[in-house]
Amino acid sequence: GAVVSQHPSWVICKSGTSVKIECRSLDFQATTMFWYRQFPKQSLMLMATSNEGSKATYEQGVEKDKFLINHASLTLSTLTVTSAHPEDSSFYICSVSGRGRTGELFFGEGSRLTVL
Amino acid sequence: DAKTTQPPSMDCAEGRAANLPCNHSTISGNEYVYWYRQIHSQGPQYIIHGLKNNETNEMASLIITEDRKSSTLILPHATLRDTAVYYCIVSITGANSKLTFGKGITLSVRP
């Protein structure tokens, strides 16, 4: 399966700052990446679909100006949490779906964000 | 995407087979059944998927009923490392298909 790497694996920041999380597809070109968020003891919630070279598609209720997504190349997508607040503290996970694949997604290790 | 229903939890003894059920009675003809698992504080891991035929790989077997309204994931010899939340998801296939996760079933493997 695909190897997906996220960085950082955990980050602590002060309220009001912005945090960038990177998602890299290490062994194949990913035209589409997905960003999920997971609160403690809850399931994964899809936030947005990141398409290489175009604007991301956000799920209902997810603020696009709050969660900036950039998919500038076939191997890298970034999620920036702008002006983070404690309620943004969560586990953020990216996944990769490439051309020709039969739909299975391969996930990164996740990035745990704690906003103080 | 069709909705799935899974029991909230189950347990099994180490070394025994773990049979995880999933109901997806509203599945449509072009939707696949996918199984993922998530070990605590890690990203989900792909296990297996299928359309109508039973599937087997090095991790598990997937048994889909003839009417496709339910399926069972079988871990033939469960180990303690198989303790995780297992998600059954139905979705159309394709590189841009997104997966919607439900609550999953928590499998606890006991020594």
Image (spheres, coloured by chain):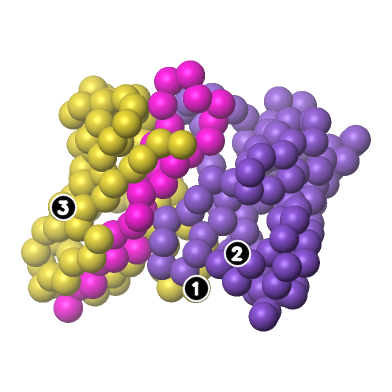
Q: Is B83 left, or right, of B24 in this rendering? A: left
**Looking at the colours in the rendered structure, which chain would you say is drawn in purple?**
B
Please tell me which residue lies in front, A83 or B103: B103
Residue B103 rendering spot, x and y as whole percentages: 60, 62
Residue at the spot 50% in from the left edge and 50% down from the top edge:
B45
Residue mark closest to the camera, 3 vs 2: 2
Q: Which disc, if any, is residue A20?
A: 3
Q: Secondary structure at mark 2?
A: helix
Q: Position of residue B27 (x, y in %)?
A: 76, 37
Name the residue at 62% across, 59% down.
B86
Q: Nearer the viewer, residue A74 or A116?
A: A74
Alpha-carbon neighbours of circle 1 within 10 Å: few (<14), some, or many (≥20)? few
Residue B78 lies in quadrant: bottom right
Chain letter for mark 1: A
Q: List x then y, in percent, for residue A79.
A: 23, 47
**Is there any visible trace of residue A88 in the rendered image?**
no
Q: Nearer the viewer, mark 2 or mark 1?
A: 2
Q: Chain of mark 3?
A: A
Q: Residues within 10 Å of mark 3 (few under 14, many from 20)?
A: some
Q: Quick check: marks 3 and 1 in contact, CB under 8 Å?
A: no
Q: Which chain is yellow?
A: A
Residue type highlighted by circle 2: Asp
